[in-house]
Image (cartoon, rainbow, N blue to C red):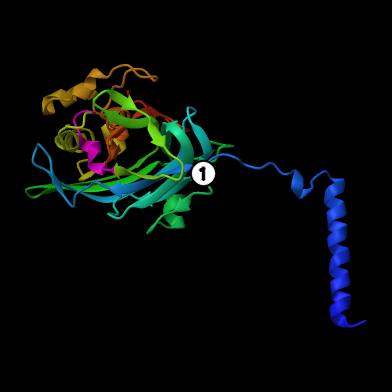
Amino acid sequence: MNMRVRRSAIVCRTLAWLSAAVASLGGAASCLPVDTRLPPGSLFLALVSDDEPSIMTADGWSISVDRLFLGIGHASLGEGCTRYSDDDYDRLLDGRLPAAQKVGVLYGLGQCDFQFVIRSPSPNTVLGAGVTEADKMQMGIWDDREPHLHDNSALDFAATATRGGETKHVRWMISQSTSYLDCARQTEGGSRLMRLESSENVTLHVGIRGVELFGNDQSTTAELRFDPFVYADDEFGDGDGNVTLQELARVDVQRLLSFGPFSGLNILHDPFGGFTSLEQYLYFVLLPKIARFRENVTCRTQRGFGSRRPAPPPQ
């Protein structure tokens, strides 16, 4: 018997044995279910920077964003449509990059709302362009098994503000997560769910704007004001030019009224009770504003997804 015939016989015996083994386990390939659904449509979520190189505030400060790293992801479609797959993972992205960066792709059919979250990195976080493992470790790793083992940061933010010969810096590691829920298109008649048709590809752009952390309220037309942050460093800190979250926590939120209209102060009810400090104003009113769609899409925001509440101001 030549070698070719012998090898063929061995292969045939092996295949016969495997077929018998599969059949004995009730797992014959012919018994697998057939997916008869239509091919899904796709919703591609992309992150883009909406910060300018520098921007002038209403009180005369020129602000430039120096650093804006954020954990973002865990995107999913709502329950009202046929879901094929969600993106149950997160990314750590540099929010200053002008090019669109992938957040996730969702597959489904029908009329769908969707959601995503900004939160601290997890052990399996995917790193974006220009982001390193050291950056991820600096922000802290969120561990679902021991969520309070470390202080984690959803946002690593730094900026420089100048006015005349004065310069101030901020470097904030912001721990609070923000969930963006019930995201849908806005029309003249109100909110309308996204419609995903079979084999249709839809792209939406999440615009990230770090300077919203200096806004005076939660509206889309809010003014930027930096004087309250200067006040925190000079009157309640060491006046060293570095504005810290600890200094913001010492500023009574009612003092903001001396720097102009701050209509966000009217939001006094929240799951944690009324906020009392400039730090909490930043967390509760301004932080959710940093992410807004370039398209006519809005979301309901909610604090949380494994977040840590800002500490109350010292007594």
Q: Nearer the viewer, residue 274 or 285?
A: 285
Q: Nearer the viewer, residue 259 or 125?
A: 125
Q: Nearer the viewer, residue 49 or 203?
A: 203
92 on left or right of 12: left
The quadrant the N terminus occupies is bottom right
- Image height check: is 52 above or below 299? below
Report x, y in % for residue 113.
Answer: 41, 31
Report x, y in % for residue 197.
Answer: 43, 39
Which residue occupies 45% across, 39% down? 75
Report x, y in % for residue 65.
Answer: 23, 49
The amino acid sitting under disc 1 is: Pro
- Image height check: is 281 above or below 118? above
216 on left or right of 114: left
The residue segment tinted magenta is: 208-218
13 on left or right of 118: right
- Examine the image and state in which quarter residue 183 appears: top left
